[in-house]
Amino acid sequence: MTVSKTAEKSSEKPGDATKGRKDAAEGLPEALQLGELSEQLGYVLKRAQLKVFENFLRCMASLQLTPAQFSVLLLVEKNPGRNQTEVASTLGILRPNFVALLDNLESRDLCARIRSTNDRRSHILVLTDKGKAVLTRAKKLVATKHESRLNELLGQANREALLEMLSKIANEF
Amino acid sequence: MTVSKTAEKSSEKPGDATKGRKDAAEGLPEALQLGELSEQLGYVLKRAQLKVFENFLRCMASLQLTPAQFSVLLLVEKNPGRNQTEVASTLGILRPNFVALLDNLESRDLCARIRSTNDRRSHILVLTDKGKAVLTRAKKLVATKHESRLNELLGQANREALLEMLSKIANEF
DNA sequence: GATAATTGTTATGGACCATATCAAATATCG
DNA sequence: CGATATTTGATATGGTCCATAACAATTATC
């Protein structure tokens, strides 16, 4: 740990920006200052969303369900007999992109497409028995492993306030 | 608007799921019930994030800055003289993906890569004069058109509480 | 009954993200 | 010192998600 090239360091005067900091001979890597970034709602919002999705995926690893797949199962359970266009659009998914998602769920026998007798163009969506069973287990996993951690972190009251504000943004912004 | 095939409708008994609802001759499209979905933090979080980013892009249309580009400019302004690896990693961007992002900003003369004299492998990042000017205008746009709407919607106190909770999730989850 | 609209689907391209790999430069250690 | 390992920026590549156009089958409209 020889102090050889210590001829720079506190030359923090604008005029020579070709230095940067040397960390090898000096202190720690010196984390960057986030500055106004930590006040930008969009930035913090996205980072939080990534963390939540990441944790969700870990909790659902045993069931192999993504957030999108879980949302489809939830919505179809609550609204059986709706067609692809309806389910996709309320989830903000475009019909073309919904096809592969459904193919996946159907191939795993979690939900089924049924030709409607009213309108033979459309496919009615229903959960299979296996789909209902998996969804029940998924809900338990989410409640015990996922949402519970959020309650720990924020507290029940804050978590509800957070949900309310985010809903407001999602619906009225 | 003839009432022709009105032989279905309230056959809401499980057993024939091939009907679905007919809306043409009857009422409105009948929006789906979100059910537990509206309580799922991940779902609401993502929808809110999309709305915020969407609004951000509209506000920044005149400057052609994406949220990611804006965050880079903010971070480089606050931490001039850092290299690509440092800036990228604090933004959660992988180095390979940071290259094109920087190519874009540099081609628009908003920031510059400067070979470091200490470590000739690394590129020191600095805002150009134009970059500083654009960032100043960008900040004003964000403050007046973007964040202000959030304050209207949530109120100042709530907005700060929201930021604090999201930061907690982003950092401690 | 001709025309328009809807549904599910395919194809396709763009944006973003992740990994492996490389050359140049530097650090490490015998 | 010199061989080896590490770091930095970069390229190539593949995956996932998102968006648009287009199509056949079916239904609605006039």
Image: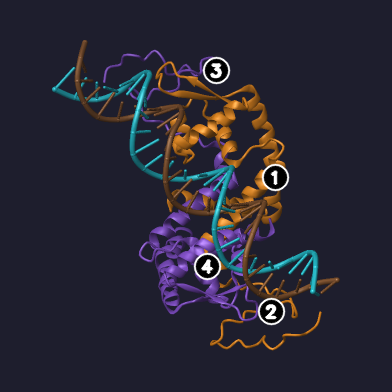
Chain colours: A purple, B orange, C cyan, D brown
Identify the amino acid type marked 3. Pro
Q: Mark 3 touching mark 2, by CB under 8 A?
A: no
Q: Quadrant of residue A145?
A: bottom left
Residue A158 seen in the figure: no
- Is A35 displayed left or right of B7 in the figure? left
Q: Mark 2 touching mark 1, by CB under 8 A?
A: no
Dot label at residue A14: 3
Q: Determine the chain carrying the residue at label 2.
A: B
Q: CA distance from mark 3 to mark 4?
A: 55 Å
Mark closer to the chain start, 2 or 1: 2
Identify the amino acid type marked 2. Lys
Mark closer to the chain start, 3 or 4: 3
Residue depicted at x 45% and y 58%? A153
Identify the amino acid type marked 1. Arg
Residue depicted at x 54% and y 14%? A15
Q: CA distance from mark 2 to mark 1?
A: 38 Å
Point out the frontmost of discs 4 and 1: 4
Residue A121 seen in the figure: yes
Q: Nearer the viewer, residue C2 or B135?
A: C2
- Is D28 displayed left or right of B16 in the figure? right
Q: Dot 3: few (<14), some (14–19), or many (≥20) neighbours within 10 Å?
A: few
Q: Determine the chain carrying the residue at label 3.
A: A
Q: CA distance from mark 4 to mark 1?
A: 30 Å
Q: CA distance from mark 3 to mark 1?
A: 35 Å
- Is B61 displayed left or right of A6 in the figure? right
Return the residue at label 2: B22
Q: CA distance from mark 2 to mark 4?
A: 22 Å
Point out the frontmost of discs 3 and 1: 1
Q: Where B160 sits versus A77, above or below?
A: above
Q: Where D10 sits versus A96, above or below?
A: above
Q: Mark 3 touching mark 1, by CB under 8 A?
A: no
